[in-house]
Image (cartoon, helix red, strand yellow):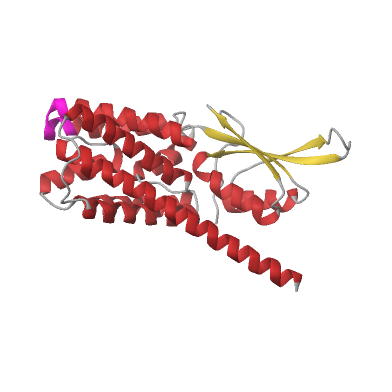
Amino acid sequence: MQAAANLKQHRRTRKGQIFKRLVFLTLGAVLFALGLKGFLVPNQIIDGGIVGISIISSTLTDTTLALWLFFLNIPFIFFGYKQIGKTFALSTLYAIFAMAVATKLFEGMVPMSTDSLLATVFGGLLLGIGVGIVIRSSGSLDGTEILAVSFSRSTPFSVGEIVMFFNVFILGAAGFVFGWDRAMYSLITYFIAFKTIDVVIDGLDQSKSVWIISENYEEIGSAIMDRLGRSLTYLDGEGAFTGEGKKVIFCVISRLEETKLKEIVTDFDKEAFIAIGNIHDVHGGRFKKKDIH
């Protein structure tokens, strides 16, 4: 009876977590779409990544922006599924779909500002807040970031550096399509959005160091290796008050994997101690994601 009650409670909690995630994914996607249609697109200012490519493509072909936003991101969602996992891929798919729908609904709205500087600042802020909320909910709104996370594991460059490399070409293309003053406004928008994401999720391209203390350390460690594909280290510890020996799990993950890791730990031990910190850079060792078959 107790086992059945625990299972029922676990399912109820799980449903609550999924509902909460969907709410925040929707909120982030709507704020992002509002930034696009309320400020940036009417003033011919773009963001970087797939969003920037979508705006340019929509302008050149005179087609709906929402379709470009959705379909250009689809290949990266499948890529994210293989590299990061099912939860991330499904969250990203939902967030991008919600963003495309919201963008379509906002198509007929009156621009919130026709002043280029105001549009640049407030459009960038809304984009950054929206992306930050979605990432904190284990999703993404732009495929180039997913690609950058993968490339960063096999190159000496960080996620931020790889994203910036892509965006140099995208923002350069904006200069030919909209004019170089619009391209410079777009560059300002990108930096504002970039820094706003930093505030919302505490770092765009930082890795995370994770310390976990639990009696179920073996099950948790195996699940991290199997479901995240991360290597880890068991350290010997000792309780300061009790003097009892304890095993400490240490591993390094990307920020996109943080939500998934917390779910894995709580699946085995809701009372486990978890400490997560930001790492500016990682070199050497085995900080490369293993292939999951």
| Residue ID at (47%, 52%) | 88
Query: Looking at the rendering, in which quadrant would you find the N terminus?
Result: bottom right
Horizontal and vertical percent for residue 177?
12, 35
Give the farthest residue toward the bottom: 1
Residue 176 located left or right of residue 164: left
**Magenta includes 157?**
no
| Residue ID at (69%, 48%) | 221
In this view of the protein, which residue sits in the foreground, 194 or 42? 42
Horizontal and vertical percent for residue 132?
42, 40
Residue 108 located left or right of residue 71: left
| Residue ID at (55%, 43%) | 258
In this view of the protein, which residue sits in the foreground, 208 or 156? 208
Horizontal and vertical percent for residue 265?
65, 50
Among the 4 quarters of the image, the one containing residue 176: top left
Among the 4 quarters of the image, the one containing residue 172: top left
Q: Which residues are magenta?
A: 174-182
Horizontal and vertical percent for residue 174?
18, 33
Give the farthest residue toward the right: 243
| Residue ID at (27%, 29%) | 121
